[in-house]
Image (tube, rainbow, N blue to C red):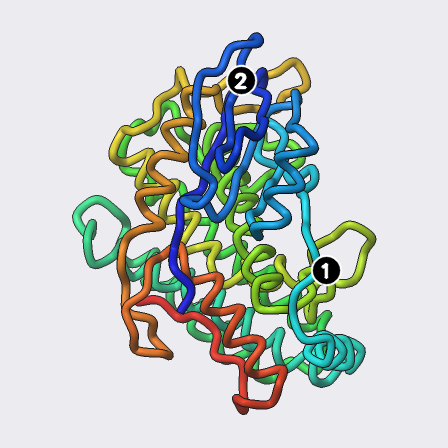
Amino acid sequence: MKKLLNTLYVTSPDRYLSLDGENVVINAGGEIIGRVPLHNLESIVTFGYTGASPALMGKCGEMGIDLCFMNQNGSFLCRTQGGISGNVLLRRQQYRIADDNERSLAIAKNIIAGKIFNSKWILERTLRDHAMRIDTEKFKDKSAFLSNAIKSCAGCASADELRGVEGEAASVYFSVFDDMILQQKEDFVFDTRNRRPPTDNVNAMLSFAYNLATGMCASALEAVGLDPFVGFMHTDRPGRRSLALDMVEEFRAVMCDRFVLMLINKKMVSAKDFEKRENGSVLMTDEARRTFLSAWQSRKSQIITHPFLEEKVEWGMLPYVQALLMSRYIRGDLDDYPVFLWK
């Protein structure tokens, strides 16, 4: 099993990254303010616009270290890449499945059923842990609806029908998302999911988390030799990491939504951590991103038992484990793709 290494997050926009021997050097205003050995890293994520030296890009490609550039709200800009790894026969089989509507739909059904299952258990956890603080009957009704939606996935005859089930399930799930915000209710209000750009504090953090998780999925898929741009549910589009977007659906509720709720309910963030722009968009401040990423890195190191493998793995390894299972299914080693189901 691959070992979980560290991710270096550079949150300030005026930082320039360079190479010194086997170290990444962080520069600000012409002065060195940090130095990190590359052998400790699996990825570098920078939210600045100053850039990185060609020498560092080349070294990261050589060592298989992701060097990823994001804008300040966490949207993906670009990443460096060394030589493409993986068996070409695996990728060719991936493309064959992607071009086969029936086989693609079978995988998509599993993924969406898993997404809805994980969303349902976020509600069930809230019912279990905070029954005195929520409308339990409302949560039970929403949970029952999601249970039926999971069953509906199996009977979908087309991708459009499946998207309809997914959309309705997401609407029901997010209809009680605000009820799961138990602290700082005045500053963190969730009315509906919005993005591009997010227009409130909660959506700003959700978008940031989803972007981070999608990047993790893309890196994991490449690590096992799959093409993150050719998906089974999300359609092909230039520059769109469709398979990574497919895979992140499994993790949205358990890895991202639950994490954002924790930050709010434990008062790790507050209203002062967000800036509202003239166009109505809301961005996290540099300090908020540092708090968020520090907690995110800690969460990645927590251990759980994988439901299919029945082995202990770190949260941060889950995208890699699922990518590995996806590759085994595509090769024909598994009869079905075992989606990640969390309880």
Residue sitting at x 72%, y 60%: 229
Image coordinates for residue 262, horizontal then vertical, percent:
31, 41
Q: Is residue 119 above or below residue 256?
A: below
Q: CA distance from mark 1 to mark 2?
A: 33 Å
Secondary structure type for disc 2? strand
The structure residue drawn at horizontal position 17% and vertical position 48%, both measured from the top left corner, is 132
Where is residue 331? Give x, y as percent.
62, 85
Q: Residue furthest left?
A: 132
Q: Which disc number belongs to residue 229? A: 1
Is 236 on the left-hand or right-hand side of 269?
right
Label 1 is placed on what type of residue? Phe
Q: How many numbered marks appear?
A: 2
Please, is residue 130 above or below residue 334 in the view?
above
The image shows residue 143 at horizontal and vertical percentages of: 38, 65
Give left or right: position of 266 versus 37: left
- Which image quarter is the N terminus in? bottom left
Residues 289 and 200: in front is 289
- Nearest to N terminus: mark 1 or mark 2: 2
Judged by depth in the image, the label closer to the viewer, 1 or 2, is: 2
Position of 332 relative to 244 (above/below): below
